[in-house]
Amino acid sequence: MIRHSGVALTALLAVLLLWAPLPFGGVTSWGEASLQVLAFCALALAMAAIDRPSDLRPVALPAAALAAVALLGCLQALPWPEALVRLISPGQARLHDQAVALLGAAAGPARLTVAAAASRAAVLSWAAAAACLLAGAAAGRRRYRRRWLGGAVLAAALFQVFFGARNANAGERTLWGVEVPIAASRLRGTFFNPNHLAAYLEIALALVFAWGWWAARRARTELALDRRVLSLAPPALIWLTLFAGLTFTASRGGLAAALAGIVAQGVLLATVQRRWAPAMLGAAAAAAGIAAAIATGLQAGPARMLATLPFDVSVGARRQGWAATVALWKGFPLTGTGLGTFRDAFTLEQPASLDGTWWHAHSGPLELLATTGPAGPLLVGAGLVALVLRLLAVVRRGRRSEDRAAGLAALGALTAVGMHECIDFGLTMPANALTLAVLAGAAASARLASVPAVAGAPLGGGSGAAGTAAAEGAPGGVRPRRSSGRAGKPDGARHHGAAGDRLELEQVKARRHRDA
């Protein structure tokens, strides 16, 4: 293990998070290549930073799912015997026969992709996401490192809002010297498409909401009003700023997804704590965001959302695109057209009513199905289920409230981005995908309490300064039960023998770990 490798890993990931949105969201070839280099370097440092391979176990299955999709793309790009291609993918065999008839031997060998170069490029993107997930898990085992990563994301998000606001107010129609096609009045930050900035801000909003919940818990232990204000004011102000920025992107899907993510975080807290006060926090945050959106101008986003009718032009075009994507998958039902080949293959089914070149399907799940067949969605779904279960365990059994807040932030971000991805393609932006992977990996690696929480006990236990302090001192944030009057010991330690000894030992270890 290289000395200070954990610090170096955290610094490298912070640089990646700060840099990721700047080169047009990483969508350019040179921008994406720079992010991939940083991701693979971070993975190498992560291998040196961990004490043992089991440290990465919390994200092993999700990372393996991403790597498996990348491997699937590699297999699609390889040359295969024509008889095998004809057997498992008649559509690919038919295209190969047409290419041979036109080009002869120059058509090359039969493959399971319509564009081998595009598939190979997509392989690197999926592999980089897996690398960021593992690197984030290696860095996230220490809470101070998670703070640096979260701070880098919030700093980058605030820059996007203020930089985008300056350009929008000035009526700039260029970004880094390149002309942008969408109205300059919509906030875009350093992204070509405002909808992709909205997906990025959804991740940051989930992070700030979890920070606010953690700050509110800590504020209960403060007796002085000024200290409470200092604890709660920063997350509240940053949240309102980011939500206002999201509003000015005029992304209807982004607004709906962000609100859904916030409500989901509140409901999750209420379910875990078995109290509805946290759910009201989520509802209050959503209401505050809507009020801020209205105060900053109805034309920025709410009016555009209300104008979304069944006959809206953009919605109608997306419906046609989704239908054509399903038809494309039916032509290649088992293997798909090839990972990352949607732009090349969509012309096979694109109706005449849809003008221009469609780079993506405006639905991540549908595009993955069309390009990889059923294998891709099944792999991603299995990895996502494993990741969500781990994050739920972190929220329920994290050793500290800060650990649980990390799990809450990651689950909120996954909910919001997942909903938005069903009607858009924000995760095809490397900045969004890699940022989400780093934060999810860091949250999933938070350590769990070895002693399970008491059934029915609120998360963190008790109320007020004494209750919060007792909760933080016990494993998993569960307050030890009060003395029953027998021998002056808590109920959990009243029974002599191995069980009581283990509980007492775990409590001592938890206190020592907290003090360290």
Image (cartoon, rainbow, N blue to C red):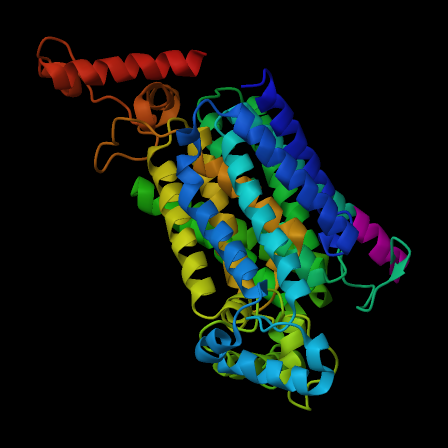
Residue at x 16%, y 20% (from the top left corner): 492
Residue 181: x, y in percent? 82, 69
Residue 475 position (above or below residue 259) = above
Residue 229 visible in image: no
Left or right side of 507 for 2: right
At a point 81% along the width and 68% down the height, the residue shown is: 183
Quadrant holding the C terminus: top left
For image coordinates 55% across by 63% down, the residue present is 421
Residue at the far front: name it. Answer: 105
Question: Splitting the image into 4 quarters, where does residue 108 fall?
Answer: bottom right
Depth check, front residue: 324 or 466: 324
Magenta stretch: give its range: 163-174
Q: Mainly helix, strand or loop, the magenta region?
A: helix
Question: In the rendered view, does 186 fall on the left or right side of 332?
Answer: right
At which x and y percent is residue 430? Answer: 66, 52
Is residue 31 shown above or below 260?
Answer: above
Quarter assignment of residue 341: bottom right
Q: Which residue of the protein is positioned furthest toward the bottom in this rendering?
A: 352
Q: Nearer the viewer, residue 145 or 334?
A: 334
Left or right: where 318 falls relative to 168: left
**Numbered-mark total:** 0
Q: Position of residue 282 (x, y in %)?
A: 47, 49
Q: Is residue 309 above or below residue 435?
A: below
Question: Where does residue 36 sit, x and y in percent of width and height?
Answer: 67, 45
Residue 294, placed above or below residue 106: above
Residue 172 lies within the magenta run: yes
Taking the magenta stretch, the answer to whether it contains residue 30 is no
Closer to the camera, 326 or 515? Answer: 326
The image quarter in which residue 221 lies: top left
Residue at the (45%, 42%) spot, across then down: 408
Q: Nearer the viewer, residue 490 or 285?
A: 490
- Res 497 visible: yes
